[in-house]
Image (tube, helix red, strand yellow):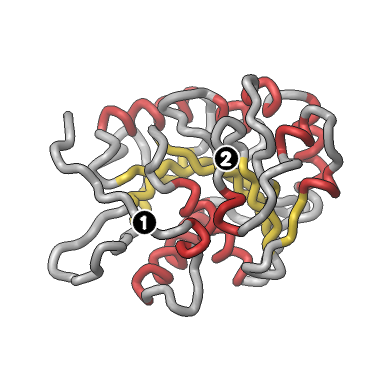
């Protein structure tokens, strides 16, 4: 299936897309509902270790990074200690949302070029939210994410935070995010409205299921409901179970 309608790209700066006091009510509620759905899908652990999941998409520019950033902020607003990790070491963009230096970051940490204390950055968005940026672009992100260094880093971080959220590269184009499956409790897939097709989503969900990763759901991004008058930047995030019928 081929979409005939082209999406209008937002001209807003990334940091302007973070939730704030001026964010429309419907959008804040959409994120609150998304947070609640994920919280119910992944209950807190008895041992006190972090709940963790990653967010991916079929292709670039579907909104996974802004959703990762705002979802992390929503969890932080509930007084949870949250770490947001930019695991897209090919094309990381989370630093733009929080006006942070993009390196040293995850790539330097996993390759031994920086310490954990050097890469974890506090944000001005909320005192409970910290970020690890992607760092320098690397040609072997899958190998770094699947390394012993990653296992050691995750073991250390899981005892420090309540939630760890990974923003990963598009699974429809590269397999990098699958290296995180042993560490996370699930994954959510972002689908850009009038962008990914049913076949695209089915392919991504199939890869996750084959890797024995719990699929939390599909998040529809950029849907503008007719008659609501949300305007040019009207976002409507919808969350649903993504089994064999993902996309229905």
Relative horizontal placement of residue 93, taking residue 206 as reference (left or right): right
Quadrant (top left/top right/bottom left/bottom right) for the N terminus: top left
Q: Is residue 41 above or below residue 246?
A: below
The mark that comes first in sequence, 2 or 1, is 1
Gap in angstroms between the C-alphas marked 2 and 1: 19 Å
Q: Is residue 236 above or below residue 148?
A: below
Foreground of the two, 145 or 16: 16
Relative horizontal placement of residue 17, taking residue 91 as reference (left or right): left
Relative horizontal placement of residue 245, taking residue 63 as reference (left or right): left
Check disc 1: other Cα within 10 Å, few if <14, some if 14-19, many if 20+.
Answer: few
Q: Which residue is mark 2?
A: 92
Q: Are dots 2 and 1 in contact, CB under 8 Å?
A: no
Tag 2, which secondary structure? loop
Residue 194: numbered disc: none
Foreground of the two, 104 or 32: 104
User: Which residue appears at 31% of the width and 60% of the height?
Assistant: 236
Foreground of the two, 241 or 67: 67
Residue 11: numbered disc: 1
Task: State the image coordinates of residue 151 (x, y, percent, origin top left).
Answer: 77, 32
User: Which residue appears at 53% of the width and 33% of the height?
Assistant: 213
User: Which residue appears at 70% of the width and 57% of the height?
Assistant: 130
User: Which residue appears at 63% of the width and 25% of the height?
Assistant: 141
Quadrant (top left/top right/bottom left/bottom right) for the C terminus: top left
Task: State the image coordinates of residue 166 (x, y, percent, origin top left).
Answer: 60, 44
């Amino acid at each position: 299936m081929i979409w005939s309608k082209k999406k209008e790209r937002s001209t807003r700066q990334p940091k302007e897309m973070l939730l704030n006091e001026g964010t429309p009510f419907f959008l804040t509620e959409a994120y609150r509902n998304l947070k609640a759905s994920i919280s119910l899908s992944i209950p807190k652990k008895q041992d006190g270790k972090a709940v963790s999941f990653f967010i991916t998409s079929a292709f670039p520019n579907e909104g996974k990074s802004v959703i990762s950033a705002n979802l992390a902020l929503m969890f932080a607003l509930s007084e949870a200690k949250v770490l947001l990790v930019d695991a897209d070491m090919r094309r990381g963009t989370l630093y733009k949302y929080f006006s942070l230096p993009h390196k040293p970051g995850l790539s330097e940490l996993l390759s031994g070029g920086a310490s954990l204390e050097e890469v974890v950055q506090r944000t001005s968005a909320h005192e409970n939210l910290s970020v690890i940026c992607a760092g320098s672009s690397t040609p072997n992100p899958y190998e770094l994410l699947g390394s012993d260094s990653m296992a050691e880093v995750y073991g250390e971080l899981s005892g420090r935070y309540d939630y760890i959220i990974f923003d990963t590269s598009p699974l429809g184009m590269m397999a990098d995010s699958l290296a995180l499956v042993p560490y996370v409790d699930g994954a959510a897939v972002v689908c850009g409205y009038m962008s990914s097709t049913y076949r695209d989503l089915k392919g991504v969900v199939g890869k996750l299921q084959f890797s024995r990763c719990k699929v939390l759901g599909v998040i529809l991004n950029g849907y503008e409901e007719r008659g609501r008058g949300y305007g040019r930047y009207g976002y409507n995030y919808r969350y649903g179970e993504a089994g064999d019928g993902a996309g229905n």
